[in-house]
Structures are given as C-alpha cells and as structure tokens.
Image: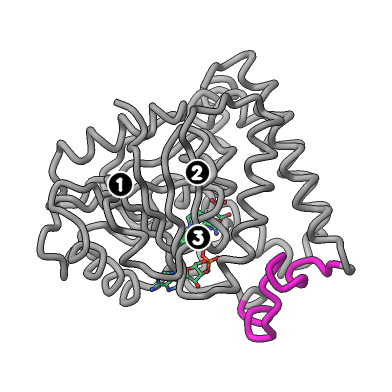
Amino acid sequence: MNVPGICAVIGSGTMGPGIAALLARHGSEVRLNDISQEALDRAESACTAASGALDQLGTPVTEGGSVSFELDAAAALDGAELVIEAVPEEIGLKRRVLERIEAAVGTGVVIATNTSGIPISDMAAAMAHPQRLVGMHWSNPPHLIPMIEVIRGERTDPAVETATVAIVEALGYKAVVEKEVPGFVENRVLYAIMRECLSLVEQGVASQEDIDTCVKWGIGYKLAVIGPMRLLDMAGLDIYSSVSGYLNPDLSDEKGISPLVTKLTEQNRLGMKTEDGMYPYAEGEVAAKRADILRGLVTVRKALSEITPV
Ligand SMILES: NC(=O)C1=CN([C@@H]2O[C@H](COP(=O)(O)OP(=O)(O)OC[C@H]3O[C@@H](n4cnc5c(N)ncnc54)[C@H](O)[C@@H]3O)[C@@H](O)[C@H]2O)C=CC1
Ligand SMILES: Cc1ncc(C=O)c(C(=O)O)c1O
C-alpha cells in the first residue's frame, strides 16, 4: 500500500503541520485545513521546520508531494482519499467536525481521528457511516516519533483498520494495533508517569528540574532501549513483587486534574504555546528550545535505529 495520493488534515495546530509534512514527504498532495487563518500562517513555518527535521533525519523525498493551506474545508476535502481529524480534544467539537467530513467525502474514504484517547465508538455515535472511522494516534512531534497507535471502534470496518496499518507502514512507521480503552496505550502510560511527577512536585519531594533529570536519564534513556515489559525481566520479577508490594499503595491515585496544572491553566500559562507554563520562557527561548528538542530527537532516533530498525 502506498501513502494516499490526496490527504486532508483537519486542524493545523500543534499536530497538523508535522503530520502534513510527513505525508507530503511520502508523495501525498496534502490539504491542511483550519478555521483560523492565523493558525494556517503559523502552520506554514511549522511545516518548513518539520521538513528541515526530516532532511536532518535523511528521510527521502517522494516526488509529487505538497502541502497547501486551506481555510475552506470543502476545498481541503475535495478528492481526499484519507482524512485525518486533528482538532482540539473536545468530543462535541470532534463529533460535529466528523459529521461534516463524512458528508463531504465518499463512503470508501478512511476517516482517521488523532484523538489522544477519546474512545472511537463514542466519537462515531453521530456518524451515518461509522465503519470508516478509525483511531490513528500520532505522537508529538508526529514527523519524528515513528510509532502510531491504530484503534478500531466497535463499528469500525476491519478492512479500514488494515488499510490504516498499511498507510502507517508505508510512512516507514511502526503501527501498534489496540482495543479501545480511554487514553489508548501510550497516554495511559504517559499520564501515569505525569500524574506521579506532578504529585512529587506538589509534595515538594524534588524540584521539577530534578524530576526531569531523573526521568530523562534514569528512565527515559533505558526505556527507549528495552521497554517496560522487558525491563521487568532485567530487574527480576521477585524484585518487582517486593517493591510494588510496598510502593504501589503509596503512588498517586489522584482522580482529578493536578492542582498545579489547574492553577497554571487558569492563568493561561499553557506551556510553549503561551511562552509560560511549568517553566518560564524568555523572549526567543521557545523557538530555541523547540529546535534543541527536534535536534535531540533526530540524533537519538538515528542512534536507536542502529540497534532497532524502525
Ligand atoms: N498536542 C499533542 O501533543 C498531541 C495532541 N493530540 C491530539 O490531536 C488533536 C489536536 O491536538 P493539537 O494539535 O495539540 O491541538 P491544537 O489546539 O494545537 O490545534 C487544533 C487546531 O484545530 C483548529 N480547529 C478548531 N476547530 C476546527 C474546525 N472545526 N475545523 C478545522 N480546524 C479547527 C484550531 O484552530 C487549532 O488550530 C487533539 O485531539 C489532541 O488530543 C495527539 C497527539 C499529541
Ligand atoms: C501531554 C501529552 N498529551 C497527549 C499526548 C498525545 O496524545 C502527548 C504526546 O504525544 O506527547 C503529550 O505529551
């Protein structure tokens, strides 16, 4: 299976541009749509940056690929063979957008949602043809993280799931096929880590800088090489039993949103997008940090590819 010739990406915020840049790199004519002209303007430079990162990675260019920036959803969807929805994580909005998408494309078109974890069946509830909706959960930044979760809802056609896996593989990425649970696999694991880290910061156990250092060097580096299930074998299941016996009851079981995150969000301190969040950012620092992160991810991915080819 090749990457579809014409793709539409609906929503061009944090995720849309990187997704579009990767599809275009693989030869697709991509229409990136947003309701905000400002977002589309920002997306142009984000696509250029993503393309630069793909150059650094050495991802070959397939002839014929392009990205166009469309305020008009109908123009973006016209002739699309694959539609990827990447609008904000709000079920009502996603349902409305999906209804409009399915009214504009043929019944054979795969409609994928990049939701971070809303069950696919919940989103498909209002669709006339729910069999073509599939979860295609990219990880941020989507042009560099070579793994996509593919999630079938109760009414997704198995052939749509198979076609989505084939597209992921045609992009040179790994597909992880899952049953639907809120958050899917990646965010269940990531949010377990983030809940504990936030709780440790809130309790004053360590500074957020030290927590970042501990997770990057102590856990992140190791897990990138062996994965948690293999790590259990490396540590010893007897050790896991002993430690988890006293530790699990002490871990955060916070059911709500972290009070610290709630406070910052109420102050519109949303992170890099508002140049203030968990950390403050001086003028120009966000661009420099983003460039450092991209450079770091390219370097680490090249190194990891030597031991585990994607
Ligand atoms: N930010 C992240 O790290 C990741 C996000 N996701 C998921 O991807 C989706 C998008 O997330 P982000 O890109 O972070 O959101 P974002 O808020 O950065 O961007 C969403 C964009 O959608 C646009 N939009 C809103 N309504 C629209 C409509 N009716 N039609 C077209 N465009 C519309 C907004 O103007 C905005 O530019 C969410 O479901 C999110 O949970 C998935 C993986 C990672
Ligand atoms: C905080 C956070 N939330 C959701 C996602 C993906 O759905 C990510 C990510 O991909 O990095 C994330 O960092």
Magenta stretch: residue 294 in it?
no
Give the image quarter of residue 221.
top right
- Identify which residue is drawn at 51% across, 22% down: 310
User: What is the tally of numbered marks visible in this picture?
Assistant: 3
- Left or right relative to 295: residue 30: left
- Identify which residue is drawn at 71% across, 70% down: 202
Q: Position of residue 8 (x, y in %)?
A: 37, 53
Q: Which residue is mark 1?
A: 82
Magenta stretch, main secondary structure class: loop
Q: Position of residue 232 (x, y in %)?
A: 52, 27
Give the image quarter of residue 266.
bottom right
Q: Which residue is mark 2?
A: 66
Amino acid on which the number 3 mark rests in the picture: Phe
Q: Residues within 10 Å of mark 2 (few under 14, many from 20)?
A: some
- Point out the stretch of residues depicted in magenta: 262-281
- Quarter of the picture containing the N terminus is top left
Q: Position of residue 30 (x, y in %)?
A: 43, 48
Amino acid on which the number 1 mark rests in the picture: Leu
Q: Which residue is mark 3?
A: 69
Magenta stretch: residue 277 in it?
yes
Between the residue at mark 3 and the residue at mark 2, the CA separation in whole angstroms equals 10 Å
Q: Nearer the viewer, mark 3 or mark 1?
A: 3
- Identify which residue is drawn at 30% across, 47% down: 82
Amino acid on which the number 2 mark rests in the picture: Ser
- Left or right relative to 167: residue 42: right
